[in-house]
Image: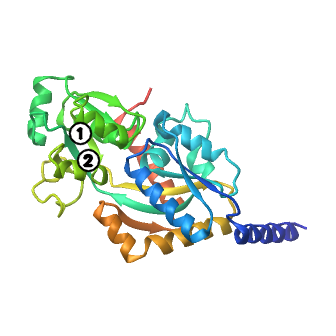
């Protein structure tokens, strides 16, 4: 009897995958338009629409550090018609920092569809901000404790936690200003002088840096970037291990049938593996790092555990 039930579910899942998608698919992005998560979400949506013959529509749903989007997708029907493009903040850190506030558990209630990209990060500052190096930033913060504002994508986001790491390592105080819309709101805050410094991804900031509207104080990469050869790494400056290798990926409700996940991944991989698309993304500082559903899901679980250990060791609590 059990065998017949399992066999029936297998055939049902296969039939669903053959027909999928038969209507428009919603891709929820947990931030405002303009940031890297939104950028890759729209690129993937366009390619899926073209290759699978149905509309894949991006819906920006910022708020609560990405938790609104997380909960919306986790509670959606597990049929492949509601998807999420999330990142290390929403899908690895939030489970640890917002355990009491979340009504879902991301590692249990969401499943990976595909790891998509990774993005280098930098410490960026407003051009009007006098410090032009990490040493000058530290000196300024020591002269004026708490008077420098730093932006983040929300409480518990990796731009927040990375700056907390830097503050602890340097022994300085700065004031945290969280923005629910990610880089799409963080960058305007720096350009307007509302905040002075932040950990930001290079995909969103490189055009501003090249135009002189923003300056890079340091990169969070293991070695200097070819695009910014004059900018030192944090490791060079004595802050090794600070800065997040930010990844972005697609997720679905946990009970989504495997044939649907495999069909989505197959289409994503076929598109993002094309040389011209990889080259276009690379010009925007988005490095394609594909991983299929099972591998990506396990990767996210390990990331979630690792961030939990860091938060406990650093005794950082998000109220």
Q: Could you tell me if residue 172 is visible in this image?
A: yes
Quick one: label 2, few (<14), some, or many (20+) residues within 10 Å? many
- Find residue 279 and name its label: none
Disc nearer the start of the sequence (1/2)? 1
Which image quarter is the C terminus in? top left
Quarter of the image where one finds residue 117: bottom left
- In the rendered structure, the answer to whether residue 175 lies left or right of residue 16 reads left
* Residue drawn where x is 71% and y is 50% of the image: 77
For label 2, the residue is 242
* Residue drawn where x is 77% and y is 70% of the image: 15
Quarter of the image where one finds residue 197: top left
- Reply above or below: 28 against 145: below
Which image quarter is the N terminus in? bottom right
Question: x and y percent of residue 190 in the render?
Answer: 24, 35
- In the rendered structure, the answer to whether residue 210 lies left or right of residue 54 reads left
* Residue drawn where x is 34% and y is 61% of the image: 286
- In the rendered structure, the answer to whether residue 245 lies left or right of residue 67 reads left
Quick one: label 1, few (<14), some, or many (20+) residues within 10 Å? many
Question: x and y percent of residue 181 in the render?
Answer: 41, 38
Question: x and y percent of residue 233 in the render?
Answer: 17, 53
Foreground of the two, 266 or 207: 207
For label 1, the residue is 166
Foreground of the two, 183 or 168: 183
Question: x and y percent of residue 136 in the render?
Answer: 8, 37
Residues tagged 1 and 2 counted as in contact (Cβ below 8 A): yes
Taking the view exactly as shown, the residue that stands out farthest to the right is 1
Which secondary structure lies at badge 1?
A: helix
Which secondary structure lies at badge 2?
A: loop
Quarter of the image where one finds residue 175: top left
């Amino acid at each position: 009897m059990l065998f017949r039930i399992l066999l029936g579910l297998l055939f049902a899942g296969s039939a669903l995958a053959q027909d999928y998608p038969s209507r428009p698919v919603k891709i929820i992005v947990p931030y405002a338009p303009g940031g890297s998560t939104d950028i890759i979400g729209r690129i993937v949506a366009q390619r899926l629409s073209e290759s699978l013959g149905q509309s894949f529509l991006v819906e920006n749903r910022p708020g609560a550090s990405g938790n609104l989007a997380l909960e919306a997708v986790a509670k959606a029907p597990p049929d492949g018609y509601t998807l999420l493009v999330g990142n290390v903040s929403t899908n690895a850190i939030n489970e640890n920092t917002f355990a009491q506030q979340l009504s879902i558990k991301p590692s249990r209630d969401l499943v990976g569809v595909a790891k998509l990209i990774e993005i280098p990060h930098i410490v960026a500052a407003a051009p009007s901000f006098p410090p032009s190096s990490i040493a000058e930033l530290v000196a300024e913060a020591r002269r004026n404790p708490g008077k420098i504002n730093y932006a983040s994508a929300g409480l518990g986001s990796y731009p927040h936690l990375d700056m907390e790491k830097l503050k602890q390592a340097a022994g300085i105080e700065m004031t945290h200003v969280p923005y629910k819309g990610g880089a799409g709101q963080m960058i305007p805050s720096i350009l307007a002088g509302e905040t002075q410094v932040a950990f930001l991804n290079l995909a969103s900031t490189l055009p501003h840096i090249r135009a002189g509207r923003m300056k890079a104080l340091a990169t969070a990469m293991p070695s200097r970037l070819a695009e910014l050869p004059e900018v030192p790494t944090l490791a060079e400056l004595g802050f090794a291990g600070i800065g997040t290798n930010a990844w972005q990926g697609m997720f679905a409700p946990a009970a989504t049938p495997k044939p649907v996940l495999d069909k989505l991944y197959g289409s994503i991989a076929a598109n993002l593996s094309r040389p011209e698309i990889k080259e276009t993304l690379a010009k925007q500082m988005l490095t394609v790092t594909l991983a299929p559903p099972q591998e990506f899901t396990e990767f996210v679980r390990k990331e979630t555990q690792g961030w939990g250990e860091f938060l406990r060791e650093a005794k950082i609590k998000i109220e």
